[in-house]
Amino acid sequence: MKHSPTRLAVLALAAALGSNTAQAAAPLEVRLTGVQHARGAIRVGLYADDKTFRKEAQALALQQVPATPGNVVVRFDDLAPGRYAIMAYHDEDGNGEMNRRFGMFPTEGYGLSNNPQVVGPPAFADSAFEAGEKAHTITIELRY
């Protein structure tokens, strides 16, 4: 099959655009500090929308790793550039949800991107960060 120079130029441009799009996604490394003990797991939810923030079932992505005293690292690969927020917690009893006293106050260790001091439910805006086309690392301190 013979290709015209115009067709070849269009194919080359499409290939170049496709490769730039593939390069736009980058990994996000989340370092969690202050894990108190090895019971249970650390669950880390990645959110891209204030309407779904803190609703784990609606997280853009979720990572779970065994708890280890001290520091734990999770990674989200191929994250497109954009605005995101993280909520992480130490699921000490392994029930897959953050336990709360009176339905509001966390009884398990938790942390948010940007480590904001919060009174009441945390807001997406306080935890939001920009991820670009290069690898990005954030550190979150778990509070018990």
Image (cartoon, grey):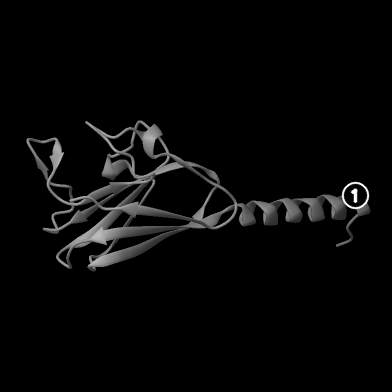
Q: How many marks?
A: 1
Q: What is the crowding at mark 1: few (fewer than 14 residues within 10 Å), some, or many (at least 20)?
A: few
Residue 108 lies left or right of residue 34; in this view the side is left
Residue 128 in percent (x, y) is at: 42, 39
Residue 75 lies left or right of residue 111; in this view the side is right
| Mark 1 residue element | helix
Residue 15 in percent (x, y) is at: 74, 56
Residue 74 lies left or right of residue 133; in this view the side is left
Q: Which residue is mark 1?
A: 6
Residue lying farthest right?
Answer: 5
Question: Image point 22% across, 50% down: which residue?
Answer: 143
Quadrant, the N terminus: bottom right
For the residue pair 18 and 95, the one nearer the viewer reads as: 95
Residue lying farthest left?
Answer: 102
Residue 101 position (above or below residue 140)? above
Residue lying farthest front?
Answer: 117
For the residue pair 2 and 84, the one nearer the viewer reads as: 84
Question: Image point 57% across, 48% down: which residue?
Answer: 132
Residue 21 lies left or right of residue 137; in this view the side is right
Residue 124 position (above or below residue 11)? above
Question: Image point 23% across, 61% down: which residue?
Answer: 35
Residue 82 in percent (x, y) is at: 52, 42
In terms of image quadrants, where is residue 3?
bottom right
Q: What amino acid type is highlighted by mark number 1?
A: Thr
Residue 71 in percent (x, y) is at: 30, 65
For the residue pair 33 and 41, the one nearer the viewer reads as: 33
